[in-house]
Image (cartoon, helix red, strand yellow):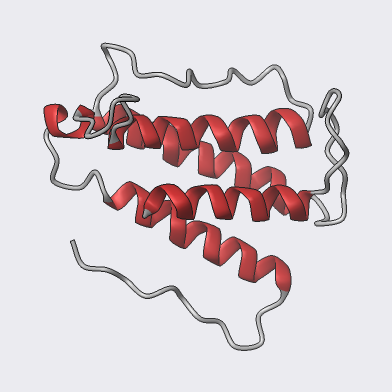
Amino acid sequence: MVDRPPPRRTGAGERESLAVLLQYQRESALAKLEGLDETSARWSPVPTGTSLLWLMKHLSMAETIWVVHRFAGRTDVPLPANELDDGDTVASVAALYRSTWAMVDEIVAGASLDDDCAALGDQSMVDLRWVLLHLLEETARHAG
């Protein structure tokens, strides 16, 4: 796999910069599955069982819980499981992750970066800017 440099946008605003860099990290993470068979995608080099396939499902869950549930307050949207099921495949998990991007991006497009999360329970209030920065950090960390 070829390492791609991050995109650069001269004069881009904060919102566009966050969106472009998050998408770059999403695609970088998902690219780790390219060319892997199902066994290799599920292989874990660590005792915790973390695999590349699980990481993509985890990132789908993280974006859903932070943007859809906590920011938008849309608990009617099912939260992806944070573990692999027997039926999960490279294709199905990649499709889940991509569909999560579309849902999250639509919510973000209709909101201000200064808007607070609708439903955080007992956690301190954070705004959409913080959520996107957190997801950017989380995705980049897992993308390697």
**Left or right of 105: which side holds 93?**
left
| Residue found 35% across the figure and 25% down from its top | 48
Q: With respect to residue 64, does 113 lie above or below? A: below
| Residue found 63% across the figure and 64% down from its top | 18
Residue 61 image offset from top left, x and y in percent:
53, 29
Does residue 81 appear anywhere in the picture?
yes
Residue 4 image offset from top left, x and y in percent:
31, 71
Instruction: State the image quarter where residue 55 is shown.
Output: top left
Residue 19 image offset from top left, x and y in percent:
60, 61
Return the residue found at the far front: 47
**Left or right of 52: which side holds 12?**
right
Q: With respect to residue 11, does 99 lie above or below? A: above
Q: With respect to residue 26, does 83 lie above or below? A: above
| Residue found 31% across the figure and 27% down from its top | 92
| Residue found 62% across the figure and 42% down from its top | 104
- Image quarter in which the C terminus is found: bottom left
Return the residue found at the far bottom: 10
Residue 131 image offset from top left, x and y in percent:
71, 47
Count of numbered circles on the image: 0
Instruction: State the image quarter where residue 123 is shown.
Output: top right
- Image quarter in which the N terminus is found: bottom left
Does residue 110 appear anywhere in the picture?
no
**Left or right of 36: which side holds 11?**
right
